[in-house]
Amino acid sequence: MMRRCPSTPRCRGGIYIAVLGAAMLVTILGMAAMAAVAVERITVEVTADVASARCAAESGVDLAMLTIKNQSTWRTARANGTWFSDVAIGGAKVSVEVTDPLDADLSNRDTDTILVKATAVRGQARHITQVSLQIQGDPADALKMAMHTPGNFHVDGAAVLAVSGAPVSTNGTFANDGTVKGSLECAALLPLGTVSGTVTLLAPAKAVPNGIVVLYASLASPFSASGIFEDQLLTPVACTAPGGAVNSAGVYLLSATGDVTIRNIRLWGTLVIRSNGNRVRIENSELLQRYRPDYPVLVIDGDAEIALDSAVLTEGARNMNPPGSPYQSITDIDTSDTYPSQIDGLVYATGKLTIVGPTKITGAVMAGSTALSNAILIQGSPEVAWDPGLLAAPPLGFMQNARMTIIPGSWAQATAP
């Protein structure tokens, strides 16, 4: 027979404790479930805030780019630094900085790369997006010509100008007293002379860019010279010019303090010459080559005469390809090498240019003079071979319809300073 538990206080207390324990367990489980829901809700909110902050930061970059597109004076009208502060975008607060990482000056050069950085904050989430912009544009029309001037283009009597790859061009009259081996474009041709290629009369005018000297002078290491400037080496790692300092981009500024004759030099870079009203002549044997493909090889402020020899450039007392300054990938420590006498790259002058044969140029030639006589004067038998690479990658400053575009691969998430 089953034995019954007597109804005693001890028995009733055990039942109470059991019930109380079960209730506490249910409560704990309920609280745990509520905590899990709260954690999940917070996680969802944080995830949403992070995603929103990221999208808002990207929108901040878009805002800066839209401002650049719509405000043509943005480089001078806006400061290097914060452009927008705590702008509400998609529930986030966004601040945008636009800076020039080269020299912290947006206004001094239209060609400098800029950095756009947008910081977005929503809730506890912060996201910083940055991207670099560079200038791009269409090549200037004058770059499509082997030689161009807005002024009078004159081929002297008995002179023979050989051009290949593109025509020679003038916005004015082409005075051909000699021979042109190639094609030409001009408003008028008088006298006719001899032309082996096609002649395009009433050709559309082509503009020569402005501001080129100021642009490249601002990038250059300066020195002065007068008289004979010869037997010098100018590269991104070597500068033998008296008073000059090495420029890592190979850009050098020669300021003429008197008439100056440049001869027997090797340039691997860009040489800017300020004539300061003095006579400038580049003669004898020279090897002038651009270092950066997006820079010209010669920029001349004023008039100049270029009269290279066909004889090779010899080193003599100066090693022209020391370590760090290779020629055709070769360096050495001797002074027994020779180099071809030629100019490779774009030659630009603000004034008149006289080119005397047998000068050889591979690239293009521009003279900004609007003179009605001899803006470009050809004597002897120079040769100019146009480089189509100038259209594929126009040198800085030689663009039209210029615009700022994103540098591929530059999008990045930045960290707070």
Image (spheres, rainbow, N blue to C red):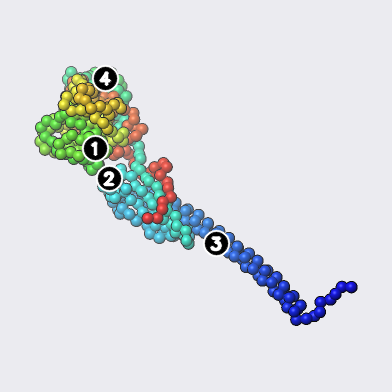
Please report whichever mark, 2 or 4, sits nearer to the chain's N-terminal start: 2
Horizontal and vertical percent for residue 387?
31, 28
Q: Residues within 10 Å of mark 2 (few under 14, many from 20)?
A: some
Look at the image and tell me in which quarter the N terminus lies: bottom right
Residue 42 circle label = 3
**Image check: 127 left or right of 159?**
right
Residue at disc 2, secondary structure: loop
- Element at badge 1? strand
- Closest to the camera, between mark 1 and mark 2, is 1
Foreground mark, 1 or 3, reads 3
Which badge, 1 or 4, is on the more N-terminal residue?
4
In the image, residue 384 sits, relative to residue 115, either above or below, namely above
Which residue, given by chain and number where applicable, does mark 4 sit on? Answer: 181
Nearer-N-terminus badge (3/4):
3
What residue sits right under mark 2 in the picture?
109
- Tell me how far mark 2 sits from mark 3, CA to CA: 49 Å
* Pointer 1 with pointer 2, Cβ within 8 A: no
Task: Say whether residue 207 is visible.
Answer: no
Pointer 1 residue = 251
